[in-house]
Amino acid sequence: MPIIKGLAQSLPRFAKRTLEKYRSITHSAPRPNRLTGNRLLYALDPHRYQSQEPNWQDYRRLSKCQLPGDVRCWLLDSGSLTQHLLRASNGEFRVQIIDQRWGRARPSEVKLLGLRRHEYVLIREVLLICKQQPWVFARSILPGSSLTGRLRFLRHFDNKPLGQMIFNDPNMVRQPFEIAKVMSDGLALPNTIEPLKNYWGRRSRFELSGKPLMVSEIFLKHFDAQFNPIENLSSQS
């Protein structure tokens, strides 16, 4: 009985200490993440912070006044961006690979491509260099299930422009654009590029012989919007 009585008396003290410890955690200043600089409450929810994805929207839901005039024609043009950049740069064009790896797509990319939740994809991130300046950041998502048969060579694609290959494919089908304003901290840009707060970008789901893949294109600071792809194309026809 004395043991039980002592235990009963100690419970309130234990509960009080637990409550004080919880309060000290929840009211203390959150610690910064060494990688992102964002502050997290690790003790309460170690997975609470996630980098926010852009708010991608179907271009048909946006009015022309919602899109900046200088890049509007580029965002809405349905032709090959690679071909337009070749003309705009007078042929001074090349692809610089930033990263190419197997990994998992972002949630909105999983939804756009209809992937399984944990399906591995080939992630390809490149800069499109025009006149010795980075004009466009491109991120491509290629599901492993799509990289079979005649598309298997894309598993080891080099610094050739992916867009050119896509538009040369006679079985290519392109879904409507999605457009967003993309924050600079959501892009894997090299440190040599001076970042802006945000950029305008677009992305599309392509299907090659029924096999899906995604390409997103973000227009960077040095992008020359003075070149109008539509007017230039019509003048050459």
Image: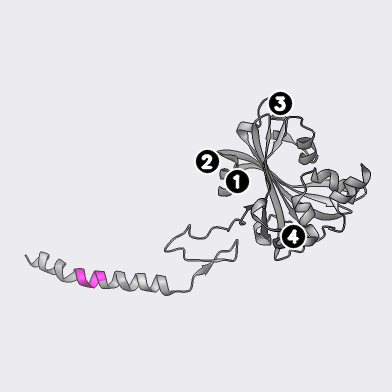
Which marked residue is nearer to the observer: mark 2 or mark 4? 2
Disc 1 crowd rating (10 Å Cα; few below 14, some 14-19, many 20+) is: some
Name the disc covering residue 109, or none: 1
Quadrant of the rendering where the C terminus is positioned:
top right
- In what element is the residue under mark 1? helix
Q: What's the mark number on residue 150?
A: 3
- Secondary structure, mark 3, is helix
Q: In what element is the residue under mark 2?
A: loop
Q: Magenta residues?
A: 11-15
Amino acid type of the residue tagged 3 in the rendering: Arg
Which structural element holds mark 4?
A: loop
Which residue occupies 70% across, 35% down? 173
The tag earlier along the polypeptide, 3 or 2, is 2
User: Disc 3 to disc 1, how far (Cα)?
Assistant: 23 Å
Residue 14 falls within the magenta-colored stretch: yes
User: In the rendered structure, are the residues bearing label 3 and label 1 in contact, judged by CB atoms less than 8 Å apart?
Assistant: no
Residue at which label 4 appears: 191
Q: CA distance from mark 4 to mark 3?
A: 37 Å
Residue type at tag 2? His
Which of disc 3 and disc 4 is earlier in sequence? Answer: 3
Magenta stretch, overall SS: helix
